[in-house]
Amino acid sequence: MKFDHEKALTRAEVLKALKARWEFEKRTERVPVGEACGRVLAQDCHAAYDLPRHRVSSFDGIAVRAADFAQGVPDTCEWVRGVHFTQADTGDDFPDEFDTIIAAEDVGYDEAGRLMLNSALEVKVGNAIKRAGATMGKGELLYEAGTLLGPEALAILAAGGWAEVPVVARLKVAYLPTGTELVPVGTVPERGQNVQTNSLMLGAYFARWGAEMIAYDIVADDRAALSIAIDRALAEADVVLVNGGSSRGSEDFNSELLQERASWFSHGVKAVPGRPIGLAVIEGKLAINVPGPMIAAYLAADWLVRGLVCHYYGQPMPQRVKVPAVLDAPLGARPGFEHLARLVAHDVGGVLHAAPVPNSATLAENIRSVNAFLAVPAGVRYEAGDVADIELLGTKAR
């Protein structure tokens, strides 16, 4: 499909247009609390009971009666465990007749096993006692619907009586790899063939972002076969991602197939790499045709699919850490296009520098080396020596 710059959208316009037209219903499910990390809570969760259920000791030590210390520290040589005091370590319940705790550091025993206390003790009622409900009170709101659950949240929910947790069901993204030249992983490619690997990369990213990939087998560049595959994917998933066939090759008609089915369609984004993207809304669902090359497919997934996943869950788009870096080479974008620059950041005498991967690098070297990113706005040019705020991709600067 021919790229029309006048009709192409910016990245921000693409996300805005798709979000406004996407008709999705959030499904919910219950999962064991131990499997809920990274999931989004579907309803408010309240504590089922007070915790602790009764007052407990906050320290390791012994429980005593504060009244016995009204005149100072008494002679405890004849004190009997279970009558005058009792062991009460951190979190322990103890008999109601005792009303205060003495920490273990102030407690000792002589050779005969008789209790000995620090003579400088000041004992008051309620010392080092955690009241009932101090950890959480019955009915207390633990987490609101829409919360992205982290490891600590699992512990709090479990403590509050939630053995199973209501969460938003994972967004289902169908992935259709297309191209007669593609062969499955494990196949030694012959002349004119390429190994289909984008599903591995994108599937791992989707899982990291909280989506579930439905991976389809390779579909050859056959219009009828592609039509069947697209219709099947639309029936099974919330979002359909068609990889390949988005540009102007003689067999690149995937975007045309989406346009035929769409109530809204747009082709092209004003950003490179990844310019030829087909965008369709089909019966309220989203279908996206992204370029086949690995880097272009990654970039499209990173800003577009990740943005849609966040929108589905009602979560803000995570922002990467930005740090200033000296650019070692010029960077710019052609007029009217953003340049999505992948960079190699490295430390030079305590100053962060960054430069694009050389054009001579292999794809493997490119993927292996890149650890930073910079979106250069349309019409902007950086010269070598300029300082720019680059995004770190989670790997250490070299």
Image (cartoon, rainbow, N blue to C red):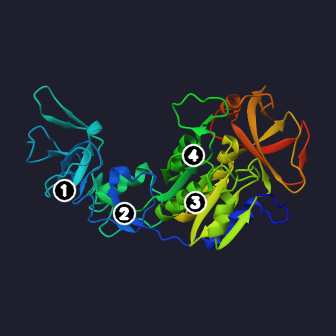
The mark that comes first in sequence, 3 or 4, is 4
Would you place residue 386 above or below residue 333 in this image? above
Tag 2 secondary structure: strand
Earlier sequence position, callout 4 versus callout 2: 2
Asked if one can make out residue 360 in the rendered structure from this viewpoint, the answer is yes
Circle nearer the N terminus (1, 4): 1
Number of the label disc, if any, that sits on residue 30: none
- Image quadrant where residue 138 sits: bottom left
Eyeballing the image, is 254 above or below 103?
below
Q: Residue at x 84, y 60 (%)?
A: 5
Alpha carbon separation for disc pair 1 and 4: 68 Å
Badge nearest the viewer, 4 or 2: 4
**How packed is label 1: few (under 14 Cα within 10 Å), some, or many (20 or more)?**
some
Mark 4 crowdedness (10 Å alpha carbons): few <14, some 14-19, many ≥20: some
Disc 4 residue type? Leu
Residue placed under numbered mark 4 in the picture: 202
> Which residue position holds label 1?
67
Q: Amino acid at mark 2?
A: Glu
Question: Which mark is first along the chain, 1 or 2?
Answer: 2
Q: Nearer the viewer, residue 162 or 265?
A: 265
Is tag 3's residue or tag 1's residue first in the polypeptide sequence? 1
Would you call the spot at circle 3 few (<14 residues within 10 Å), some (14-19), or many (20 or more)?
some
Image location of residue 377, percent across then percent down: 83, 53
Three-letter amino acid code at disc 3? Ser
- Residue at 23% x, 58% y: name it: 55
Q: Nearer the viewer, mark 3 or mark 4?
A: 3
Give the residue number, with chain letter if any, for mark 2: 29
Which residue position holds label 3?
227
- Tags 3 and 2 touching, CB below 8 Å: no
Point out the frontmost of discs 2 and 1: 2
Q: Amino acid at mark 1?
A: Ala
Q: Where's residue 322, x and y in %?
A: 72, 46
